[in-house]
Image: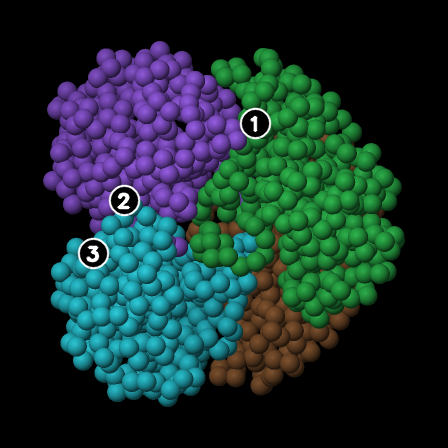
Chain colours: A purple, B brown, C cyan, D green
């Protein structure tokens, strides 16, 4: 059994880790920390853990000794915090999976420019691996620190990687029009996320300057082997969970939809969590809710020479905690689907 | 034009008053106050008022001179506040419609017991009229102070009044099982009303001790001419608006559903806002959203001798601001449906 | 591995069985039938099964030979059908779990009166066991035919059983005011369940005559050892899943809330799926979604002498397919929580 | 009073017309037709009309004599039907507002190519005016036949017109990524729009070939004075109403956000229903629900040289029935806001 700890357990990503790790046959959760909730039992914080064994675990403070017994540490902390906590834990021989932004970038300057803080462990950043298994599985196997991707970048990159890799995307900006359920905005109270205000609403936010933009660009450029420029527009729609990206890419040549499907099938052959959909199916968030799967499909528009890619995932699972568990499975040489194989829900 | 002022405009009831009064042909909103929002324009606080004339009005402080020019004052303030603000305004010759609890009770002791504050204007309480027009229209016409009923009591009382009045209800507790949309809980941030927490949920709250219990009991007893005891259980369901009461009353005798319908039709003959539904229709909240209407229906259960009454309304309209406007229309001798006649919405 | 078959797989209960059985370590789904969908793969019918192994299974016709290899047969068919299909399968030595109404009653006349069809296998009805494990575990162990309870009766009976058993409920009707998510109404298209019509709505239906009434009464009477009369009022609220019952029972004596909690804790001691909640928590549907758990709580109202019980479950899991799997686990001597132990979801 | 008739009243656009026309001070609804509902009263079809005067109107057959007394006819019929019904009504001296597609195109060949039917009244098509008042007010004043725009084209065109008109858009495809509430798909039953299937879902549909594409292109080209090519991707999100378009346009030059705001303000100066939002506000569907308003905002992305435009409206109002009433007001020389001035709703 792998001994796991979670810091920042009170947020939604922390809670989702609890859900997934509690059902994982090779993991024991030995400590869960939250500064604001220390002393309470998990079942007090999460109504869904009432009557569940893990719900009896008492939340500790992040500074406590509880984490010294952990082999793997999941960090669900605001950016800037993980970079401070990780080095000490690594010194004790553990491995770190950070669900925040601190270890997602290769370039320190990019991180510091977009997040507006100095990075507390720049040398670790150089060592860290970007935890998108479909692109970096081999590096993850050998990593000590995994920067778990953002929810939007996961959907965007899984959607565009096959095309970028195959050299099918022409120069020119790629547009990622993305829509997220409200859990993506976190558990902190906000007037515009009060139930009665968000119910029935649809809205864009963070135009032009959202921090997931450079994350998408850095990885997309790496896959393409050239600089890729991205316009990223996030929106909120009124559900708890689910994330949808509609991606517009200029094609270097005419493609048929059948050819596109084949490209995705080949690229994701053997991948347990990326599901290219054949005609006439299109991705839909409800089809992947509570799973670690990402549904993708691509269509060519002969009138404009653009490829339109659709990518759907659960922002809390493949977009956060599920991907973190997948990364843990890889780090420890386990079957990658352990704890993540459950079918989706319907309805 | 009646010059109207609103104090506590930032909350949902205040906002709904804006919506209704802005469309009222005989009203001019001359001042709107909110301590926390003073200085901002209404359109900054309510996205629905962007591009609407009233949205340009600047919010003032409740203490300002703006209200001296008002003829009627709508108070959307926490309990305890209205009782302090009302006397001064009445001295200036105005009329007061309080959407809070301060003027809903006849008995000061009942108010003080359930709200746990001393009443600041007990003599006014004696003078105030309970603003349920279907029961107290004649008194409202002559009132200076109207205590606008709570949302739950409105649904409950409109549902049970015809039976109580007709002497068809046997001794024994009446059960009011009520379900409300989330706006009823107000605009203040609360962890359990954060969008992602409330989405998909259904829950009871305030069991056994909700403050609307004595309000329902006092009025029900008055209608019945004897003491009526009520068990009131409120619940939240995941929508912004809508309120549903399912009421169980012990019957003095066997009744047919047709007879029940006739009793409701007779009782509410000429009432513009209470809609008894004939077979096979049953009340549904969506049928009354954004209107001042209350749909009601009753069925007799021969197996148990109980009458089951269903009552549906929009908690923001007939349950708050719409009823307040109806009361204002009565106070000023206007057609009672002025500003309130719009059909409902579908879908 | 237990070889399982499902007839009526296209409906929501059938789909939920797929979800749960696909994740069950001791079950192999060998055949899934649906008359209308025969020939299609499961992934075509359920978007959530795209990219999931079980999704490749081709749906067969209920008459096909596929079921001869099954040990246990789950029937998700309209009432009347299971009573016809079960006898033949039992002759082959299999066991039957019927998620419909055909084997829920002890009294044939009650079934025939409320369902208005002649029962096709009345002798089997006598043999069948009502599959509420918390009340009938020992009988289920030895059964060949299990009548899986309805969703409403499960919530109602788990809520009231401890009180009835303890003799704490006085003569007089028990009121079950219940609220269900829309999946409970099934997958067949209906104008009033079209998305745009149901969105934002709350409504009662099936007043006075819903078929779950006699099911609740028959079992409640058995637990109480005397006839219990029930008024049952179902409602729909706008979510896919979740079921809430608010139950009003006349108490034989004054009780404290602490005493009530103890009664529930004792009654459900060792039960893995019924979760009595201590103060200050109250049941909420979102806390049990996608789980086989039922949250319960009870409060005494000293003003009226009634006990108010709240009971929340997922109508598709503890209210249907999850309970069926629990029954299967019991039938085969497995750990009762196999395949059902996952924590709930949040948010 | 203008005597108005509606054909196709059973659908959502028809119902919305009822709502708006019933509240219009200068209109009398004299006849409402629906082939499938003839003989029923409107209140039987629309729960929101129970207890409302117009709800008593009996639905007639479209062929009946009722429409001979109408001055203006609103057609909410499937494409192909309006072109057959309009000529006869015009001969009687009436005016026609078609909410379907039959009179939206200038080019018959474009209509016939995308809608795959021969146009039954091509000469009328030449005469008909595209009913987007912000672009064609003067022509509408003199029209006999108005082709009321589609919901998506309205949002898209109001969003992009100021930029196209000002010559600020470079050659190259314009991308319209649009999201609609479910009412846009109509009232006909569909498995994928069953409540439990759509609840919680987000999905794209109609990729590359949606029929609103040529409608947007034809009008956009007219405004721009050159051919504009559009990629249009519609999606559904789980609400009844609301429509959001996110539009990406290549700019001819660098622009500031302030400059963009000014361009929109100038273009829409005096327009009662288009609301350009200043920083820091962004359009949101809930801000325009149940109103005829369209909120718009534009931002420049200096990293890619694209302008991102956001446009939000209620697909049933400005996207259908509200715009039709606006067109009627123009046709009859009335104040354009008559019956359409109500503030939005919150929450």
Image depth: mark 3 or mark 2 in front: 3
- Give the residue displayed 25% in from the left and 30% down from the top: A133
- Give the residue displayed 70% in from the left and 68% down from the top: D38
Position above or below: A231 against D107: above
Mark 3 to mark 1: distance in Å? 50 Å
Residue at mark 2: chain: A
Few, some or many residues within 10 Å of mark 1 (<14, 14–19, 20+): many
As drawn, the label of residue B13 is: none
Classify residue A73 by image quadrant: top left
Quickly name the residue at label 2: A19
Quickly name the residue at label 3: C24
Mark 3 to mark 2: distance in Å? 17 Å
Which residue is outermost to the top? A109
Q: Would residue D276 appear left or right of A94 to someone viewing this image?
A: right
User: Where in the figure is residue A279, as x and y percent of width and height?
Assistant: 39, 45
Quickly name the residue at label 1: D174
């Amino acid at each position: 059994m792998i001994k796991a700890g979670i810091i920042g357990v009170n947020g939604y990503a922390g809670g989702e880790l609890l859900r997934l790790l509690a059902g994982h046959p090779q993991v024991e959760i030995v400590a869960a920390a939250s500064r604001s909730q220390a002393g309470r039992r998990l079942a007090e914080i999460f109504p869904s853990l009432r009557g569940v064994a893990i719900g009896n675990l008492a939340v500790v403070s992040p500074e406590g000794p509880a984490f010294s017994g952990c082999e793997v540490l999941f960090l669900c902390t605001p950016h800037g915090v993980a970079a401070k906590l990780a080095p000490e834990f690594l010194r004790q021989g553990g491995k770190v999976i950070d669900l925040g932004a601190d270890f997602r970038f290769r370039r320190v300057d990019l991180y510091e420019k977009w997040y507006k803080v100095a990075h507390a462990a720049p040398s670790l950043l150089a060592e860290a691996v970007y935890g998108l298994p479909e692109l970096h599985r081999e590096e993850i196997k050998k990593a000590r620190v995994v920067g778990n991707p953002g929810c939007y970048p996961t959907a965007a990159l899984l959607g565009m990687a096959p095309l970028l890799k195959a050299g099918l995307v022409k120069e020119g900006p790629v547009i990622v029009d993305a829509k997220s359920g409200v859990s993506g905005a976190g558990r902190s109270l906000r007037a515009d996320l009060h139930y009665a205000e968000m119910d029935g609403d649809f809205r864009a936010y963070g135009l032009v300057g959202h921090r997931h933009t450079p994350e998408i660009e850095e990885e997309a450029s790496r896959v393409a082997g050239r600089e890729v420029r991205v316009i990223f527009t996030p929106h909120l729609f009124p559900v708890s969970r689910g994330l949808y990206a509609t991606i517009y890419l200029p094609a270097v040549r005419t493609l048929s939809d059948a050819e596109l499907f084949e490209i995705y099938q080949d690229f994701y052959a053997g991948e347990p969590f990326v599901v290219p959909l054949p005609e006439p199916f299109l991705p839909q968030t409800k089809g992947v809710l509570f799973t670690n799967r990402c549904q993708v499909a691509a269509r060519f528009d002969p009138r404009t020479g653009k490829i339109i890619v659709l990518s759907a995932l659960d922002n809390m699972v493949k977009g956060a905690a599920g991907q973190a568990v997948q990364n843990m499975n890889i780090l420890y040489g386990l079957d990658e689907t352990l704890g993540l194989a459950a079918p989706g829900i319907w309805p």
